[in-house]
Each structure stands twice: as structure tokens, then as C-alpha cells.
Image (spheres, grey):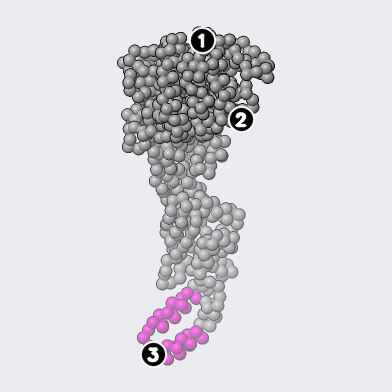
Amino acid sequence: MKQKGLTVFRQLREFFRQKVPRRVTVIAGIALLIGTGLILTEVLFGQEHPHTVMQAYLKHWETGKYDSMYQLLSEKDRKKVSKKEFIEKHKDLADTLGQKEIRFRMEKTEEPTQTVHYRTTIDSKKVGKIQFDTKGKVVESEDGEWRVDWTPSMMIPGLTGEDQVEVRHVPGLRGEIRTKDGQGLAVNKGSVTIGAVPGEIPDLSTFQSQLSRLLDMKPEEIKEKLSKAAPLKYVPLKKVSPEKKETIAKALEVEGVSIQNHTQRHYPKGALTAHITGFAAPLTSEQLKERKDEGYREGDIAGRAGLEKAMEKKLRGKPGIRIAIVGPDQKEKRVLGTTSPQNGTDIRLTIDLNTQQRLYDSLKGDTGAFVALDPQTGAVLGAVSTPSYNPNAFAKGLTDKEYKQHIGSIANRFVHNYTPGSTMKPITAAIGLETGKMKPGTTYDTRSGKWQKDSSWGGYYVRRVDHPNVPVDLQKAMAWSDNIYFARVGLNIGAESFQQQLLRFGFQDSLPFPIPVTNATFSNNGKFKNDIQLADTAYGQGQLQVSPIFWASIYTAFVNDGNMLQPRLILEEGKDTVEPKVWRKNVISPETAQTIHRILKGVVTTPGGSGNDLKTPGVELAMKTGTAELKKSYDDPNPMELGWLATLSGKPGAKPDLLTISMVKDVHDRDGSHYLFPEIKKLLKQRYH
């Protein structure tokens, strides 16, 4: 009946196109209308024609009324796909595409047809505009109604019920970490994955047997990996270096094998720079859940330690997106939209690898940390933590359990806190001079070898190491590392004043450094609870906690007119040097800074000074030793000792150009803070001779 109606429309149109008088046209039209009677009535007042139905369907789609769309499907289609499934398909597609808005424009035709062509435009928050032409068909139902003849291809041309629309992330190349002269510390290296699609393996037994020998894998291991995957999904079996060309070639001779090329993170210097670079590794399932909002997907790598973690946003860049129709064989049938990946930014460091190697060799086999700076600029020349680890082994990915098992070697000791021992004494002296509570000539009689403020201290005494039994001034006290002298200076300064001065030095504040640094503290609760704690803190014990990198920043003040420089590890783009950047301005006066620097030189030159053995021809050296005792109890006879050493060196008459801070654990019966003297001497000779 509908087709008859359409024929009548055509006849009417042709009739009225003829050039006949208007009056004749009207009369003839009326006659024709009367003649067609029921047919015309059905056309004019009956159900919608095909385009009207499709127009309503697309309008519902634009407004997200999927329920109403479903009501316009043919009875046959409603039997094939349930309402729930239909709605989920459209919602899932919108979500996958990142759909913000969808619009349709139907193609105009001179005559109504059952096939309707339309252009789809989707505004995607993932890839921008997606646009394609497609078509839909309407059919007449038994009750004379026009209905949509639905297929998945109405959603996207070429889409079938077996296909999926997938968002595939295309990672950009991760930024590389290099020294200022271009030597790679964390780089991208080519890698080859040997794998297979289970459904494309003709003989599984032969496949397992041949490949297990080539890849050094057990046949059962290969079988297990393949059995867990869908028949048409690619299964990676083992990564190999591109240099293993023979292995790759022989693997490709095995029927069913296919390879994939990609890049992986590589650390050319291994353990030498591990605590600077850290490592990047594939995220675990738990980490993926935690960082899903940051755009990470399965298989993505992220920094887990060091600069790789601290500079993740800069190094990672931004992945590209590829939205495509993917068949059951996981091959792309049609790409709907893409965005280009943005490569991460390369980072260049101030590190000098010769210095780094010397520091590492000095501590190899011990537990400790070693930092070297240029005190004129704050540039970090070397930074080592031991024991170290090979980041290449970690880059393949660790479970949280495995990570915890290696936490001892991953721990970065040059940014963690430890008790500094007598290396605190120059800071106490500087505070004493600044507050006017002492002068370089101030003397105390410490010949008894032990001292307490008064009887309120009970059985507690401050004790000193043996030295000539004479009254000591600041120079002798520093050279001989007299605990009693500095304990008394601390008490003269007073708790409140001492606390305020330490805050000026940056205690309890965050040191600006790419790798997060633990804040230095002088008390567990931010206050001195009594005079004993104040006295102990003044000579480097008590609850005092500092990191080697923070300590290096403080020591820069002694050669920069009282200004503490910020340690600089990363070079600005296009520059090979760093400009000095003051972190704490005027923590002490230039006069006090010069006095402390002179006093520290005296540690080397004063007879019986703790630094006499480090005197090196052709080197002007200022230094301070320190041995921190970590007692389990007050009367612990065998405390664990930390050996500290701070040095400022340069050529005679020139401004110091090398500052080192070293800390070694467990130096009891190993010459204490002098343990590293031989290595420091090698470093000085190598640098200045």
C-alpha cells in the first residue's frame, strides 16, 4: 500500500509541474484527489514515510534517548538484540569515543527511499572531531509501520557484531637523562619481543619444543602463557636484544612465531648512577588502579625511584591516542581518529662522571652516602648511595613484594636523615658568633675530660676525646673536636635562640632539589625539652637529623658570604653550567662565614688537629670530621657509629671549587670518621694534580 502511495505522489508532482493554467490545475488536482480516494488518505494521514522515521531515530540518538531509538527498530531486530544490549552498545561506544556531542545530517533526496544516507559528526574529548558517512535502512512492518532495519554498521561503517571499537594508546618516547657532555644515564633502547597468536600455531607441541630451546624457556612455561590468552590475541613470550639477530632469525623459522619491535628503558652506567636516575618500570595492577586518572594504561612504565620518579611528568611526555575498529584477530580494520604522541623532554645533569666514579669507588662495599658540589654554584658533581643496585634489573618490573625485598639497596641515603656528629660544630660556632655569645678567643677549661652543667644532670656528663690538657679556644676546640666546648657554647646561646637560628639555616623546611629530601630536624617535636638535649645537639648528637645533601647546602654558606646555595642537579635547556641560586640568604654575616672557613682550615693545620692526615700538597683544605654514636641505651658499650667528613677544597689562594660530604655506617673499630681519609686524599690528588 505504501508503494502505491509513493506512486501517487510522483504522479501528483509530475502533474503540477506541467505548464497549465492555475484554475485548470486546481480542478484537475481535485478530480485526481477524489479519484485516488483511500490511497491518498492513507498517504496524507497514515503512518510516517521512511525519512521521517529515520529522522526521529537520529534525533533520539543526538539527545541520548537510546530507549526511544530501540522502539523504532523492526520486530526482527528487537528479537535479535535486547533493549539492554542495544542501549549498552551505544553507551559503550559513546564512552569509548569520549563523545561530547554527536550530530547527524541526512542526505537530501528528490524521492523518499528506504535507504537513508547520513553524515555522522562526533566531537570527541579524546581525538577531536570524528566524521564519517554511513547509511541506514527502513523497512515496512506487517502492520504498515516503517521501522529501522538495524545493524552495527549504522553506528560506524564496517562495524560488525564480532568487532570492537578500541582506544589504543601510542606512547611517546620517554625523555632521556644524560650528563652535560651527552653521556647517557637513562636512555631508550630497542627491544624485540618474540611471541605468537595461539590460533595461528599449527602444531603446539612442535612449537613449544623448538621455541623452548631458543628462548631458554620450559615448554610448560610457554604452554601456560599461551593457554591463558584468547585464540586470536598476541602473546608475548620473551624480550631479546636486537643484537641477538641469530636468535630472532631462528625463532621466525618456527611456524606461528611473530615478533614485535619496541623500546625499553636502559641504564648504561648501572649501579654507578642508580640513585640519581632511579628506574622506570611497568606499573603493577595496584599502581594502575591508583594512577588511572593520570592516563596510565596496562603495560605503561612510570618512574619508581630517583629522577625517573621525581621528573615523571617531564620525562613521560603525553601518549597519543588511536581509536580504531579492531577485528577478532586484533588487527585494525578502520582508524576513526588519532592524536600524535608527544615525546618526553630530555634532561641534562651537572654530574661529572669521573667524580661520580671516584665517590662510588670510595664507598663500594660499605653502607653510606657521598655528595660532591661545586660550592661556587651549587652544581652537584657527584652523588652516591651504597649499597647500590642495577636499575636495568628493576626496569623489567617488580611486584610490590619484590620491591620491598630490595628496599635496602633502593634507599637513597644522600637525601635521607642521619645524626651528623661533630660536623655540626661549625654551625654551632657560627650561631655563637652571630648571637654574640662567643668570640673566636672564647676559652673553656675542658681538661677534666667530662662536664655537666650542675647536679640536676644526675649521672649524665658530656665527654670529650683526649687532647692536650690546656684551655681551648674556638680554633683548638674545632681542630680537636671538643664536645665539652661546644656543649657549653650551645647552653650559652640558649634553647630559644639556638632553635630560631637553626630554623634560619633551613631546619624543618623543604630543600629545593629534584629528588625529594627529608626535612632536617633538631628535635622530634620541634623544641628542646631540656638543657641536656640542647647541649648534645650543639656538638652533633641529641635528636639532630640531617641528610648529606642538606649538609652540603649549609656548608656552602661558609664560602659564599653567609648565603646557603641550592644544590643544582639539572641543567637548564641549552646551558652547560648553572648559575648560583641562593636558598637561604644571609644565614650568617660575611665576617662570620670567613671566620668559620678559616677555623676549618685550621682543622688541617693545627697540631693534633683531626684533619692533619688529610694535608695534601698543592691543595688548600678546610674540613671537619664527625663521629655520630647511635646508642641503644645510655651505657651501651658498643654503639653503632656513623663516620662523617665535610671538606672544602681548592688550589692555594683560590676560592674553593669542591665541597664534599660523606657518611659511612658502622665505622666502630674502623678508624671512625677517618675511615675515608685515604679515598678523600685520592680524590684531591686526582682533581688538583
Residue lying farthest bottom?
A: 23
Crowd band around label 1 with a 10 angstrom C-alpha radius: few (<14), some (14–19), many (20+): few
At a point 57% along the width and 20% down the height, the residue shown is: 488
Amino acid type of the residue that numbered disc 2 sits on in the rendered structure: Lys
Instruction: Quickly name the residue at label 3.
Output: 21
Instruction: Quickly name the residue at label 1.
Output: 470
Amino acid type of the residue that numbered disc 3 sits on in the rendered structure: Pro
Q: For residue 621: magenta?
A: no
Picture coordinates of residue 356, whole percent (x, y): 39, 22
At a point 34% along the width and 28% down the height, the residue shown is: 183
SS of the residue under disc 1: loop
Residue 645 appears in the picture as rendered: no
For the stretch drawn in magenta, the main secondary structure is helix
Q: For residue 11: magenta?
A: yes
Amino acid type of the residue that numbered disc 1 sits on in the rendered structure: Val
Crowd band around label 3 with a 10 angstrom C-alpha radius: few (<14), some (14–19), many (20+): few
Magenta range: 5-34
At a point 45% along the width and 70% down the height, the residue shown is: 112
Residue 649 appears in the picture as rendered: yes
Relative to 355, residue 513 above or below: below
Instruction: Quickly name the residue at label 2.
Output: 527
